[in-house]
Each structure stands twice: as structure tokens, then as C-alpha cells.
Image (cartoon, rainbow, N blue to C red):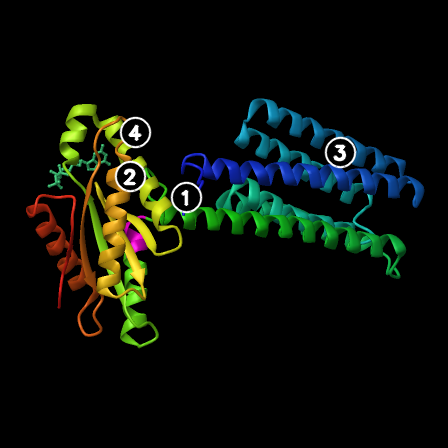
Amino acid sequence: MQLNVPTPSEQPFVHQSQLLRAVLKIIGVFSLLIGTINIFAFERFDIAAFNFVSAIVALLLLIYFQRSKQLLRTSWLTCAAVTFNVLMFIHLANGESYSVLWVMILPPIMFFLLGRAVGAWLTAALFLYVIVFMALQLPSAEPRAFSISGLLNITEVCIALWFLFRFYEGSRESAYRQLERQSMTDKLTGLYNRIKLDAVVAEQHQLVSSGQLKRSIVVIADIDDFKSINDQLGHIQGDKVLQHAATLLRNFTRDDGIIGRWGGEEFMLILPNYTLTQAQHYSDLLRRYIADHGTPFAQPLTMSFGLAELGKEIPAEQTFIRADRALYRAKEAGRNCVKVAHS
Ligand SMILES: Nc1nc2c(ncn2[C@@H]2O[C@H](COP(=O)(O)OP(=O)(O)OP(=O)(O)O)[C@@H](O)[C@H]2O)c(=O)[nH]1
């Protein structure tokens, strides 16, 4: 259950940086392709020159970003370069051959890179500009038949939008999954946190109540005399002992149950389909496994265990209370032992 999760502070930066790099690469590749088409298919060297310049600008921005890591500045420069390029292309083509369609690639780029508010204002302003520009062309416009260049523009814009949205959605989904993992992970130990444990217990309770699961046992495991470990070694080393205890718990339980950090020096293990007797035996083996390993600082490490079965009729919180009372009895009995709450 160990999860490698980036720290929350680096997460948005990673996501935005990936987006920026993808946008610059897409712009670079597209500009090269379209420039080539403009030379060989239409002999529009002026437009092709713009395309090649924008490919070079995209490459330079990519290099600049790799070196400086200036996310916001590079995002603004990218948006400015793309806007300039699209508007120049529309002007050079006099708005003909569906060239105005290219304005459609601006919203995804601006929204991705500059955020919802700035993206909304900028794209609205650019759309307005293009509508006015087209309106001014109306008096001199002649009705034209659908042309090969019009078809190409439509195709290119569709492909560009497809790539942009496909990448964006993939990147958004992976960011969401990472956030989801973070929200259920205890930062210190990498085990499930209390939020996730509450959800697991609620789900198990529901399964037991509906008869889909025969039974489920909640085990609370607490490190003995952890305060004195902290006092002797200091808080930082105390954290390492907690991490070590988490590793031992994870290594022993593997797929047998669901394990997490309940809080402080307390852990919770949920054992679906175990009887109380089986869970008691299992917990005793776990107790011995931990005592045999000690702390990484050659000190004894023991844990006490309190067990309770999730009951059909009683609320899940009552099971926590009963398991906690059993744990209390284990502490009173001298620690390093397992006690069961019998209904
Ligand atoms: N290093 C470290 N210590 C913690 C953390 N969370 C809680 N603690 C410490 O855990 C200790 C728990 O102390 P007590 O509740 O007295 O329990 P105990 O010393 O383990 O005694 P028993 O449970 O009765 O065996 C306190 O000193 C807390 O400061 C943590 O994240 N890191």
C-alpha cells in the first residue's frame, strides 16, 4: 500500500509544466507541417515564413522554460506568440479559406496556461476582434465555393484541437488521481489515513449489514510507551520509528487486510471475513513479529492490540469504541498483548 505521491506544493507545478511543454511541442510540430504545406501546396511563402518563425519561437520558449523554470512568464509569452501568429495568418489570408477557424485553438491554450479568469477575458477579446475583422471584410467579400485550402484549414484545426484536448484531459485525469491518492494517504507513513479508514469501515459495515459480507474485524494497534521513545530519541527519530512500525505492519499484513494510520502512534487493521478467534490469533502473530524486530535504533518495539467485530445492528462508531476499550485493557494488562471485545 506504499504510495509514491509528490508533495502537495510541487503537484500543481508539475501538472502546469507538463501542459506548457505539450502546448509548445504541438505548436512547434504543427507550425512546421503547415509551413511545409503552404510552400508546396499553395506557394504562400509569406504565410510559410510565419509558420517557420512560430516553430522556432516555440522551440526557443521550450528551451527558455527548461532553463529558467519560469512557468507564468513562459505561459504568457507562449500565449502572446500563438495569438500573434494566428492573427497574422488570418490577416495574411484576408480571413478567407476558413482561416478564421484558427482562432478556435486559442481558448484551450489560454485556459490551460493562464487559468479560467484570464483565459475567459483574453479569448473573449480575441473572438470579438476576429468577428469585427470579418465584419469589415463583408463589403468586399465575394461568395466563394468551398476550396481545398478551406478543407485543409478545417482538418488542421480539428486535429490540433483533438491533440490539445486529448492531452489536457489525460493530464487532468492523472492530476485528479494523484490528488485522490494524496487525500487518502498518511504523509509520514504512506499508509492509508484516517479519512480513508473511516470510508473503508463504513463500507465494510454496509456490506456486513446487507449480508454481502459475513463479518469484518476492526483491530486497533498502538505502539507501547511511545512517549518514552520520543523522549529518548527525539521527535524526528520518533517519526522514523513510526515509519518503521508502518513498514513492519505492511510487510506482515500484505493482502490479508486493510491497514492505515489511525492517528499519532495508533494504527488500524481491518480484517474482512475473519472470525474474532482467527483475528485474535492473527493479531498475536503480528504482535510477536513486531516485538522480534525492534526499532531501527536497537530498542525494543512492542504494540498492544484491541479487537472488535463490526456488528450488523450497531453503528460503526460503536465498534471503534469497543476496540478502543479492548486496547485499553491490553495496556492495563501490561502492554504487548492482544485483547478482544466480546459482544
Ligand atoms: N514522533 C512523533 N510522535 C508522535 C506523533 N504523534 C503522536 N506522537 C507522540 O506519541 C506519544 C503518545 O503518548 P501516549 O499517548 O502517552 O502513549 P504512550 O507513551 O505510547 O503510552 P501507552 O500508549 O500507554 O503505551 C506522545 O508523546 C505524542 O507526542 C508523531 O507523528 N510523531
Tell me how far mark 4 sits from mark 3, CA to CA: 56 Å
Tell me how far mark 1 sits from mark 2, CA to CA: 13 Å
Q: Mark 3 or mark 2, which has the lower sequence index? A: 3
Which residue, given by chain and number where applicable, does mark 1 sit on?
A: 2
Image point (45%, 40%), residue name: 4
Tell me how far mark 4 sits from mark 2, CA to CA: 10 Å
Q: Nearer the viewer, mark 4 or mark 3?
A: 4
Question: Where are the magenta residues, as a range?
Answer: 193-197
Please name the amino acid that badge 1 sits on.
Answer: Gln
Tell me how far mark 1 sits from mark 4, CA to CA: 19 Å
Please name the amino acid that badge 2 sits on.
Answer: Ala
Among the 4 quarters of the image, the one containing residue 20: top right
Which residue, given by chain and number where applicable, does mark 2 sit on?
A: 245
Ligand 1 quadrant assignment: top left
- Disc 4 is placed on an element classified as loop
Q: Which of the numbered marks, if any, corresponds to residue 55?
A: 3
Q: Was residue 195 drawn as part of the magenta stretch in this picture?
A: yes
Q: Is residue 118 above or below residue 306?
A: above
